[in-house]
Image (cartoon, grey):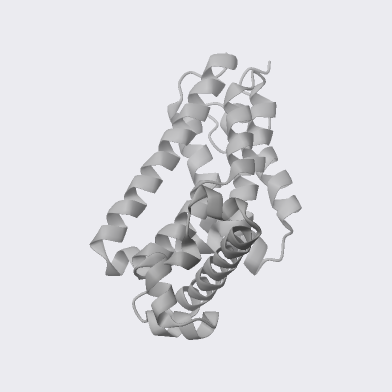
């Protein structure tokens, strides 16, 4: 379609720039409408016609831009997975030599990702239950998340002598950063995103690097290396 032309000369022209801007607005309207409908009606029950009506566009436009519901869901997922600010914070966390600071940066990255996209996790879980192809795509994203957490935990082991291996911190970091926990604290209990981030950083430091294997809950309230 000419509306979505990617010709370099066309995009550089005033008309081309306007077309690109309109195309971006159209994409946002469609994905925004789909996000709301997927969350309220369920992925399987939502039709492209309903999305088109909610977005205020023709259903043919939805087909032309995304091709299918799965295409819309993929665009939503890419926005969650490819978050520049969250990715930068994660990269800084892995590169950080201070374990405490690394976990602060990681808490920041998690806050940024879930603040704008924790609802999409529930949407994807619902969609995956209805579509095996989506289930495979979600499994790949989850595997990538776990690899990232394992990478962070391994970097903590390298800089924290009290940690014997990466197994325990990996499990703790995985559990404490689940999107469901963010939703419970922020959506249900009314925490701010700032409060969540501060709590998460403290909890990660306390449980991932300041408790020993024989004191898993930290009930003695002291680091494993204290005397």
Residue 3, horizontal then vertical, whole percent: 49, 67
Residue in the image at 39% along x and 47% along y: 141
Q: Can residue 220 be seen in this view?
A: no
How many numbered discs, if any? 0
Residue in the image at 65% along x and 44% along y: 200
- Which residue is outermost to the left? 132
- Residue 51 vertical placement versus 204 (above, below): below
- Residue 113 vertical placement versus 18 (above, below): above
Residue in the image at 59% along x and 34% along y: 90
Residue 127, horizontal then vertical, whole percent: 35, 67
Tell me which corner region of the image, top left, top right, bottom left or bottom right, holds residue 183: bottom right
User: Which one is nearer the viewer's eye here, 22 or 222?
Assistant: 22
Q: Is residue 134 left or right of residue 141?
A: left
Figure quadrant of the N terminus: bottom left
Residue 210, horizontal then vertical, whole percent: 63, 28
Residue in the image at 52% along x and 19% along y: 157
- Residue 44 vertical placement versus 110 (above, below): below
Tell me which corner region of the image, top left, top right, bottom left or bottom right, holds residue 61: bottom left
Residue 63, horizontal then vertical, whole percent: 37, 73
User: Which one is nearer the viewer's eye here, 124 or 179?
Assistant: 124
User: Which one is nearer the viewer's eye here, 19 or 145?
Assistant: 19
């Amino acid at each position: 379609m000419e509306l979505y032309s990617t010709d370099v000369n066309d995009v550089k022209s005033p008309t081309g720039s306007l077309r690109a801007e309109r195309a971006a607005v159209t994409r946002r309207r469609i994905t925004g409408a789909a996000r709301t409908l997927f969350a309220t009606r369920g992925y399987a029950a939502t039709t492209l016609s309903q999305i088109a009506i909610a977005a205020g566009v023709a259903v043919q436009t939805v087909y032309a831009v995304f091709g299918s519901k799965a295409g819309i869901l993929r665009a939503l997922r890419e926005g969650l997975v490819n978050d520049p600010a969250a990715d930068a914070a994660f990269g800084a966390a892995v590169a950080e030599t201070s374990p405490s600071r690394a976990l602060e940066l990681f808490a920041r990255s998690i806050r940024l990702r879930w603040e704008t996209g924790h609802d999409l996790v529930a949407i994807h879980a619902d969609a995956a239950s209805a579509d095996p192809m989506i289930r495979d795509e979600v499994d790949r994203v989850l595997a990538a998340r776990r690899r990232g957490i394992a990478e962070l935990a391994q970097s903590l082991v390298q800089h924290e002598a009290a940690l014997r291996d990466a197994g325990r911190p990996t499990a703790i970091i995985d559990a404490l950063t689940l999107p469901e926990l963010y939703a419970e604290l922020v959506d249900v209990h009314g925490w701010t995103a700032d409060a969540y981030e501060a709590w998460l950083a403290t909890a990660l430091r306390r449980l991932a690097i300041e408790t020993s294997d024989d004191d898993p809950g930290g009930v003695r309230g002291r680091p494993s290396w204290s005397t």
